[in-house]
Image (cartoon, helix red, strand yellow):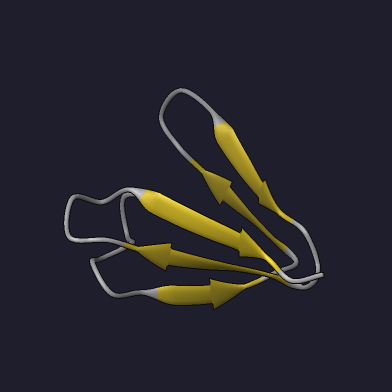
Amino acid sequence: MTELKPGNLMEGPAIIECKDTNVVLEPGATLVVDKYLNLLIEKMK
């Protein structure tokens, strides 16, 4: 998480390690980091 920057785009499968949790990005899902460093995840159907 500490290396992610606003605008980064990632496609699953992936695991993002954070200070107090982990985020699992499933296959077919995408993650975008917004300007506030929120992780926005969208799952494709």
Q: Residue at x 55, y 57 (%)?
A: 41
Could you say where residue 16 lies in the image, as x and y percent from the top left? 55, 50
Could you say where residue 30 lies in the image, as x and y percent from the top left? 60, 70
Q: Is residue 18 above or below residue 35?
A: above
Could you say where residue 23 lies in the image, as x and y percent from the top left? 60, 43
Left or right: residue 30 versus residue 45 is left
Could you say where residue 44 lies in the image, as x and y percent from the top left? 74, 71
Residue lying at the far front in this picture: please name it: 45
Left or right: residue 36 versus residue 8 is left
Q: Residue at x 81, y 68 (%)?
A: 27
Q: Is residue 9 above or below residue 42?
A: below
Q: Is residue 37 above or below residue 31?
A: above
Q: Is residue 1 visible?
A: no
Q: Quadrant of residue 28?
A: bottom right
Q: Residue at x 45, y 56 (%)?
A: 40
Nearer to me, 13 or 38: 38
Left or right: residue 36 versus residue 14 is left
Report the label total.
0
Is the C terminus in the top left, top right, bottom left or bottom right quadrant?
bottom right
Q: Is residue 17 above or below residue 14?
A: above
